[in-house]
Structures are given as C-alpha cells and as structure tokens.
Image (cartoon, rainbow, N blue to C red):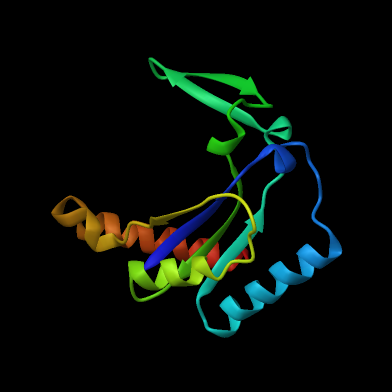
C-alpha cells in the first residue's frame, strides 16, 4: 500500500523561514531510516504558497489565482510517498517524524484494483505505458 504523507504548513513555513542545520540533520536522519527500511518512494519540501498558484475551473474554463493563500494550516509544506503493508504501519512511521509542532496528514494512494471493472484492460495497458515512460524520464 502506498500512502501520501503531507506535513501541513504553518506561519513559519509560509514566511519562507528555512530550517536550521540541526533540523535539516534531524530530518535527514529520519529520511535515511525510511530509505534504509525500503519504505520511502519520494519526499520533498515545498516553497511557500507566495511562490505558488491555484488554477480553478468553472464551466470548464480555468482561472489562475497567484499566492500567497490564506489558512496556512490547510496548506502542504512538504510530503513523503511511502509504501508500507498497512495504514497502521504508515501511522507508526509518521509518529517517528522529528516534528515538534504541527500536523501531518496520511492519505492512501489509489491502486489499480481500487477502480474496479471501469478500469478496463485497455485502460490498464495505457496506464502501464505511461508509467514506463515516466520511469525512462527519471
């Protein structure tokens, strides 16, 4: 099972305050644990919303809203993509994260079988082709 683990923004991350050397080292050690355990598939920090944009759709037409965005606690400051055997295991890994204040959200990533019969063999084959192409680009 794959899970998206999202660390929520706060006033500090939205202000663009960079982590200290000690904080970077602590997070690096945590990331190393995830990698050595074969759990971490990806993980990155994100710039503040002031450097971002939202694209809203209404009636099929896009409109762009540049950041910053309000409600920092609802924004994502960084993420991990992990692969573990259960929801409980994902929670246990996140509980070990070196965060002193804040909130981390855990959401399961859809797998092919979650889509049922609507995800036809033809659609599955096309998806496999796309994933292969992505792998070549990395």
For the point 44% across and 71% down, which residue is it? 92
For the point 33% across and 72% down, which residue is it? 86
Q: Is residue 31 above or below residue 9?
A: below
**Quarter of the figure with residue 35:** bottom right
Q: Nearer the viewer, residue 121 or 101?
A: 101
Q: Residue furthest front?
A: 100
Q: Nearer the viewer, residue 48 or 25?
A: 25
Q: Residue furthest right?
A: 21
* x, y percent for residue 56: 49, 23
Q: Is residue 67 above or below residue 83?
A: above
Q: Quadrant of the C terminus?
A: bottom right
* x, y percent for residue 40: 54, 72
For the point 63% across and 29% down, which residue is it? 53
Relative horizontal placement of residue 65, taking residue 19 as reference (left or right): left
For the point 70% across and 76% down, which residue is it? 29
Relative horizontal placement of residue 85, taking residue 130 as reference (left or right): left
**Quarter of the figure with residue 65:** top right
């Amino acid at each position: 099972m794959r899970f998206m683990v999202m660390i929520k923004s706060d006033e500090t991350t939205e202000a663009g305050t960079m982590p200290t050397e000690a904080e970077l080292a602590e997070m690096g050690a945590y990331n190393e644990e995830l990698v050595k355990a074969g759990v971490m598939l990806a993980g990155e920090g994100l710039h503040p919303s002031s450097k971002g944009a939202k694209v809203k759709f209404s009636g099929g037409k896009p409109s762009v809203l540049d950041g910053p965005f309000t409600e920092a606690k609802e924004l994502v400051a960084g993420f991990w993509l992990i692969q573990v055997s259960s929801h409980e295991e994902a929670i246990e890994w996140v509980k070990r994260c070196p965060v002193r204040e804040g909130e981390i959200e855990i959401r399961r990533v859809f797998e092919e079988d979650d889509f049922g019969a609507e995800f036809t063999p033809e659609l599955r084959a096309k998806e496999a082709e796309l994933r292969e192409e992505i792998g070549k680009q990395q």
